[in-house]
Amino acid sequence: MATNLTQQLDTPAPPNLGTPDVLYSESYFRQTNGSLNVYFNKLRNLFGALLGPRGGKWVNMPYGAFQDTTDQTATANTATVMTFNTTDFSNGVVVEDGSKLRVSQGGIYNLQFSVQFQNADTQLHDVSIWLRQDAAGAGTDIAGSAGLVSVPNSHGGIDGHAIVGWNYFVTLDANDFVEIWWSTPSTQVTIQHYAAGTSPTRPSTASVVATMSFVSNLSTETA
């Protein structure tokens, strides 16, 4: 998909007012006022564009979008990290070591993800999903982030499928990372990617997709 990233606003440079003469100079006064008028007009236009009805198009916020195009498996009842092998978009958010979604700027981020599960067993199985966040260089599970989802059993010789999508607000310091972890009681439950289909023609399916969007800086105010 073509994306136009060339539009931007120019930050007006402060005017060079020079050094006034010892005695009053009308020409210097006119020149100074003219420079200030130009500068303040540029500021007015800048703030008008930013604060106008479509001012958000000029705002450059950190973001990242990542996906995985491989199948992922887990040992039964074992915490396993979800991984990514493709970066779709990256601006201040990167994927490291295949799983760590790391931010260069601290703030509140909206993490959204979707996972394509497959169950080849004849029994329904629950899957647990949760987040793990960097803390002093080591990942720590985020309290309250875990959730359970039931993946349908195989039926009529067809594997069961479920696509799961959640989103969280997470608070991260600069250079922190967040990971998505999962566990399953059965090795027959996997995270699957699928090639493009036919009858009808349809695009391929990523096994995992995640996006991180900057929401707000970290407030320094106290209640």
Image (spheres, rainbow, N blue to C red):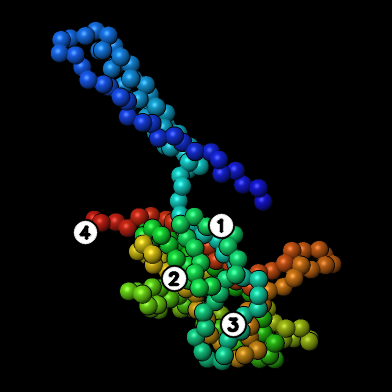
Q: How much space separates mark 2 and mark 1, taking CA atoms?
A: 17 Å
Which residue matches tag 4?
223
Residue 15: % across, % down: 32, 25
Quadrant position of the C terminus in the picture: bottom left
Mark 2 or mark 1, earlier in chain: 1
Query: Within 10 angstroms of label 3, few (less than 14), some, or many (20 or more) residues?
Result: some
Query: Within 10 angstroms of label 2, few (less than 14), some, or many (20 or more) residues?
Result: many
Query: Within 10 angstroms of label 4, few (less than 14), some, or many (20 or more) residues?
Result: few
Q: What residue is drawn where x is 56% and y is 92%?
A: 76
Q: What residue is drawn where x is 56% and y is 74%?
A: 83
Mark 3 or mark 1, earlier in chain: 1
Q: How much space separates mark 2 and mark 4, taking CA atoms?
A: 28 Å
Q: How much space separates mark 1 and mark 4, taking CA atoms?
A: 37 Å
**Dot 1: element:** strand
Residue 124 in view of the camera: no
In the image, which disc is placed on residue 178? 2
Which residue matches tag 1?
89
Q: Hey, which quadrant is residue 156 in on the image? A: bottom right
**CB atoms of marks 3 and 1 within 8 Å:** no
